[in-house]
Amino acid sequence: QVQLVESGGGLVQAGGSLRLSCAASGRLFSIYTMRWYRQISGTERKLAATITSSGTAYYEDSVKGRFTISRDNAKNTVYLQMNSLKPEDTGLYYCNALTMGVEYWGQGTQVTVSS
């Protein structure tokens, strides 16, 4: 069982930045694929960024060049640095861990970008 706890959400003006953190339990964090999803305006949850166990990162088109996903295996933590935020980035952001074909989810953290 893997527990994920997100933090770092909040209210920011358009053009500002936030850094989300997701702390994971367990001793095998380094082998997890970690992902950030977001749910915007009641739409379905969508993948925003992925980082593999080897550190390779992938991004959804709308966040490329603005968001950066990273991980610190020594701290069992994955981060999402979000720059140049837009009002359309407002939503719930969820951390996801994928290991051995099983997914785990955090509880989500709210990001609100005011215009």
Image: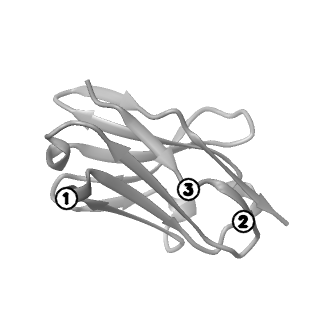
- Measured in 3D between alpha carbons, the distance from the residue under mark 3 to the one under mark 1, in whole angstroms, is 19 Å
The image position of residue 23, as x and y in percent, is 36, 47
Quarter of the rendering occupied by the N terminus: top left
* Residue type beneath disc 3: Gly
Front residue of 75 and 113: 75
Front residue of 114 and 41: 114
The answer to whether 28 appears left or right of 19 in the picture is left
Label 3 Cα neighbours within 10 Å, binned few <14 / some 14-19 / many ≥20: some
Report the disc number at residue 55: none
- Measured in 3D between alpha carbons, the distance from the residue under mark 2 to the one under mark 1, in whole angstroms, is 32 Å
The answer to whether 29 appears left or right of 82 in the picture is left
Q: Residue at x 56, y 35 (%)?
A: 45
N-term-proximal mark, 3 vs 2:
3
The residue under label 3 is 8
The residue under label 1 is 74
Label 2 Cα neighbours within 10 Å, binned few <14 / some 14-19 / many ≥20: some
The residue under label 2 is 86
